[in-house]
Image (cartoon, helix red, strand yellow):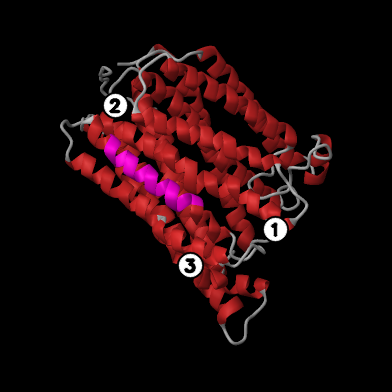
Amino acid sequence: MQYKSQAVAKPYFIAAIGLFVGQILFGLIMGLQYVIGDFLFPAIPFNVARMVHTNLLIVWLLFGFMGAAYYMVPEESETELWSPKLALAMFWIFLVAGALTIVGYLTVPYATLAEYTGNNILSTMGREFLEQPLLTKIGIVVVALAFLLNLTMTMLKGRKTSISMVLMLGLWGLAVFFLFSFYNPDNLVLDKFYWWWVVHLWVEGVWELILGALLAFVLIKVTGVDREVIEKWLYVIITLTLITGIIGTGHHYFWIGTPGYWQWWGSIFSALEPIPFFAMTVFAFNMVNRRRREHPNKAATLWALGTGVMSFLGAGVWGFLHTLAPVNYYTHGTQITAAHGHMAFYGAYAMVVLCIISYAMPLLRGRAANSNKAQVMEMWSFWLMTISMVFITLFLTAAGILQVWLQRYSDTPIPFMQAQDQISLFYWMREWTGVIFLIGLVVYVASFFVKGEEKAASA
């Protein structure tokens, strides 16, 4: 059954995809700057391009999560959203604040931006991924609190399901751990220690709960498998996620001045972190194999299966490759880290947001699924983006291995910049596969505009 207030998800989805395109464009700019050092300098220096690239990643995923929650919670709760007007107001506040922040990065020197936005009152800027000005961070908190109030009130007046409870646990965790972005101690060890409470406990903790809930919701819809079966799988996955992810934070504490026991704790529990991702992959394929109906939206099913596989490879396998302390000693901060980050973010979070958009957008437009022609285009986009990301990851991994050898492991190590020159071929290969990824994303967007046979929305 469709609920009228689910329509507030649509602008969130549209904004998410628009910001995703922006993120990829700045990724390509950065990729060229790796091999053509003065490309777009001084208009867009590398540090600014990197800041925009990573901030757009976070913001577009947050828009995607919020849109997904606004679509999913009314349906799971079997009641209209508590306040659609509040949801739309927060959408515009978040979008305008995000856009102004990006404009600030691109047009104002970062130190000047900090001075203008109150960083002298409460110093929160200058840390990777958390570069947002103080005013933007406060705005994010306000938007998050209004968002959580809206969803919590919706759930309180309706049905409570395991899937919506897991989703809300993840979303509340996201908001709570973001508060550590306001804590910026002078001691560098303490600073990095708590910085990971945002960055790691988001992507390897509470975001995984959001991922599991969204994947479970889509699988129920496209397979018709009993809710009880899917919920049992979900409980196993989130238990493994929380146990391994929380203590696994220790793999970031190896070399920042923390006690030596973190090398053991971090290594052991990080080695277990691929298990929930493997369970998620088995879960997705198991549910599709046991399906009781053939859902007309084949593209959404493909995205759901792809999310399981790619999150296991990116977050699980590539994470494990360099997470043990004796290995990380050599690989820390090299292109191997970048390889893991790219495939993990794409496989675990970008793909699940694209999956829920693929499932929900046709329904929001009054049909059960896009036309066959549109779905074929969307599946092409899936393969273009996914295969491109696999090759981006492989090229960065090769660059990282060579970098480790040249710069850190050989008997005659060479300086950083000389090593970068030696691995530039892999950067060029990464750039061309990035262009193909962008083409895949454009095809994904275009698929929603393809005309075809109309299908009535199913209940």
Assess disc 3: are there few (<14), some (14-19) or many (≥20) residues with their C-alpha within 10 Å of its C-alpha. many
Residue range corresponding to the magenta coloring: 231-246
Specify the amino acid type for callout 1: Val
List the single residue furthest toward the bottom: 411
The secondary structure making up most of the magenta span is helix
Does the CB distance between marks 2 and 3 fall below 8 Å?
no
Dot 2 falls on a residue whose secondary structure is loop
**Residue matched to label 1:** 189
Q: Nearer the viewer, residue 395 or 344?
A: 344
Place of residue 61 in the rendered image (x, y in percent of width and height, measured from the top left):
51, 37
Q: Nearer the viewer, residue 88 or 18?
A: 88
Front: mark 1 or 2:
1
Q: Which residue is mark 3?
A: 324
Rendering coords of residue 120 (x, y %): 84, 40
- Vertical placement of residue 233 versus 329, above or below: above
Is residue 245 on the magenta stretch?
A: yes
Q: Residue under label 2, please give it.
A: 369
